Amino acid sequence: MRARTYLAALITLITLPAAALADPIVIGFSAPDTGPAATAALWQRWGVDLALDEINKSGGLLGQKVQILEEDNHCNPSEAVNAANKLVEAKVAAIIGAHCSSATLATMPIVKDAKIPMVEGVATSPKITELSGVGGNEWVFRINPSDQDMMVGLGRYLKEHTNFHKVAVIAEDTDFGRGGVTAFADVAKGDGITLLSTDYYPQNEPDFTTILTRVQQLHPDAIALFQLGGDQINFLRNAMQMGLTIPYTGRVELGGKNMQIIEQGGMEGSVSAWPYSTLIDAPINKQFVAAIQAKDHSIPYLQTWAGYDCFRLIAQAIKAAGSAEPAKIRDALQHITFVNAMGRTVKFDDHNQAGTTIVINRVQDKTVKVAEVLELK
């Protein structure tokens, strides 16, 4: 009986396809599974999982299956370093991450020293652009535009299409918050926008009543927000409870969990710059939206798109390199031409940035609409 069992096992091994016998290609994923961006991390994982399913169902990469190794960075710089070190020790081929700007900036020296490429699709700090590619770190790539790029597009739109002449700014005290505020302030000067005030607060602030009371007394035309989703929904609820009817701008999310506020009329007239929209009319985007709706019973969000395209981009680089060696993947990324989920053909510039699309969203009649789609030159 035992001999027959061994023989059956041997026959099974012989008849298995080569991809089943080969070691899998492992892609690292540094994400804020806990902390202020936990919900957004879940949305990003939807995109990663969809890309992973599509690639493995089509035969994997280089005749090997692909696996994801995920580490929680808590949207915190020190935890991001720990997560990155774990992924480096696991000898992953490449890394998707690290979602939050502070976490990404903390991870950048780790991947540079380890010589493992990292592709980012959510973090927007302009510092990432400055430090990547010819800025000194050739191992970090970003597919979404920075806050500086998005604020240039937003500032132009606000000047030409709104009456937002006086704006109060509220931001989390992080690299994302401060980077966004700096970019918005730079653009405001040239677009005739006066900043009435700037308030920073620590992440996970439980109550924004004091800040909102002070800002309300300034009578701004709009409030520019630079904060993560968990804090943002609390902020917006506080504003509604106080009866504020001031529209929002900056990097306010016009969708996601904020849809409940939008549908109640709490964000009427708000205008925001965003790297992705489900409303982009391209066949590949429609397929992507339909796939996420079928799989996760939701529309894809910015973070979902980022996870999906970061994974697809790494997979394309592995195919182009004909290798899962990190250095060869890095070299392939530097020269790759990629069609993203919005149907845009992009390439990385000398700072390893490929974010060229800026979507201007606007709330009208309790509905989010695409007001304009800008392409960076």
Image (cartoon, helix red, strand yellow):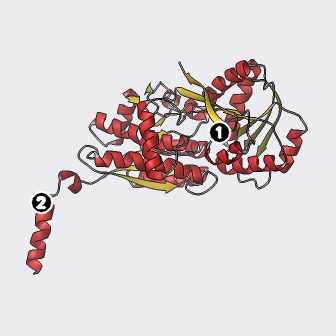
Asked whether 106 or 256 is in front, the reply is 256
Q: Where does residue 304 sit, x and y in percent of width and height? A: 50, 44
- Residue at the location (44% across, 53% down)? 87
Please name the residue that numbered disc 1 is placed on: 254
Which residue is at the front of the view, 167 or 296? 296
Q: Nearer the viewer, residue 207 or 138?
A: 207
Label of residue 281 in the image: none
Q: How many marks?
A: 2
Residue 243 drawn at (x, y percent): 84, 45
Q: Position of residue 355 (x, y in %)?
A: 51, 29
Q: Residue furthest front?
A: 365
Is label 1 in contact with label 2 (beta carbons under 8 Å)? no
- Amino acid identity at mark 1: Leu
Residue 347 in the figure: left or right of residue 240? left
Give the answer, above or below, for where 214 lies relative to 10: above
Mark 2 crowd level (few <14, some 14–19, many ≥20, 10 Å Cα):
few
Farthest-out residue, bottom: 1
The residue positioned 67% from the left and 48% from the top of the image is 260
Circle 1: is it few (<14), some (14-19), or many (20+) Cα within 10 Å? many
Task: Judge left or right: residue 169 versus residue 141.
Answer: right
Circle on res. 14 = 2
Residue 118 in sight here: no
Q: Is 151 above or below relative to 295?
A: above
Compare marks 1 and 2 and give the one earlier in the sequence: 2
Q: Amino acid at mark 2?
A: Ile
